[in-house]
Image (tube, rainbow, N blue to C red):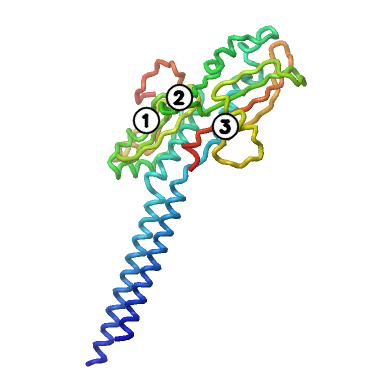
Amino acid sequence: MKRRNKRGEILVENVIFIVLNLVFISILAIFLINQSSGVVLLEQPYAKQLALLADGARPGMKIYLDMTSAKKISEKKGIPFENVISVDGNAVYVKLSEHSGKGYTFFNDIKLNAYPQESLQGEERYTGLYVLVFSHQNSVLEDSNEV
Amino acid sequence: MKSKKGNSLISLYWFFILGIIVGGVLIMTNAFYSAPYDVRNMEAELLGNHVANCISPEGKMHHLLIIGGRFFPAFKEDFEGKCKLNFAGFEDWDIEEYYVHVEIFKGAAKIPSYNLSAGNKNWEIDCEAEGVKFNKLPVCFNKTYYSYDNQSTLWRIELLSAVSKVQENVK
């Protein structure tokens, strides 16, 4: 009887120990995965990428930017995809969650109009692409979705 | 009884070690992911090329810069406007974060015939600090190229562009 009890105790202790270790490692892994695909990591590169595109652009250019990963995150965080990119003068802002957002400025005196490409097929409203239309700063083209 | 004490001691010690590992991983991940991407190299090059294209579009000197073999002062007065530059940046910027300086030489002359500049002149001194690797200094881009005017006169153009934007690009 004594032997049986002893064996049982050791087994329970080991199981608890292993389970706790697994929990610990799982939490660490989840944290690392979240960090590498997180909001902070995407907002800044997108904002800088957009600003550099604006710097190198000329009036009349139309650029399609794949923002599928941003779309997934913004939808998860409750931000409508059409509100992800905003332009204020010579600064472009990317917002993927309620409490974050990154902006970057461009030197090119050009007007940038950014809007998501609408999907013609399937249930999803947007394709995940963003359309960037560049025009002269004093251009009369309205900030509408038709180009 | 002895072995039980030993076991619990090992468990505590083990979780203490795990705690240190987790702490280390958190600190390292935070340091890695919170460091901003430094895009100033590309930005300075884009600025340089933008101005170069403005001074001599399609390889010929701008028709409003040189008229009848002489420099037209109105171009200098409205350099930013003529070259479609906007250095205003964010509203909270106290200083301009860009600088561009152009020197135009006639052929192989050593003294520039004309010069143009826009932005924060302070960055020019920082650009002269060659070999100094300090990422809180602005990133500079130099370019020298040749162009002809309408009268087929050869001009050498030396261009310097600088982008500071330390706050957005350096941790």
Locate residue B123 relative to residue A54 in the image: left or right. right
Chain that bears disc 2: A
Image position of B2 with respect to B69: above or below: below
Q: Are marks 2 and 3 on the same chain?
A: no
B34 in relation to B13, above or below: above
Q: Position of residue A108 (x, y in %)?
A: 50, 24
Q: Nearer the viewer, residue B158 or A72?
A: B158
Residue B14, image quadrant:
bottom left
Binning the other alpha carbons within 10 Å of mark 3 as few (below 14), some (14 to 19) or many (20 upward) gives many
Of discs 3 and 1, which sits in the foreground?
3
Q: Which residue is mark 3?
A: B44
Q: Find the distance from the CA under tag 2 to the CA under tag 1.
A: 14 Å
Q: Which residue: 56% across, 40% down?
A: B135
Q: Position of residue B19 (x, y in %)?
A: 37, 64
Which numbered dot is residue A86? Answer: 1
Label 3, secondary structure: give it. Answer: helix
Residue A13 vs residue A131: left or right?
left
Which type of secondary structure does the marked residue at label 1 adopt? Answer: strand
Residue where numbered disc 2 is placed: A134
Q: Amino acid at mark 2?
A: Phe
Find the residue positioned furthest to the left: A1
Q: What secondary structure is marked by label 2?
A: strand
Q: Position of residue B37 (x, y in %)?
A: 49, 42
Instruction: Please report whichever mark, 2 or 1, sits nearer to the chain's N-terminal start.
Output: 1
- Amino acid carrying label 3: it is Ala
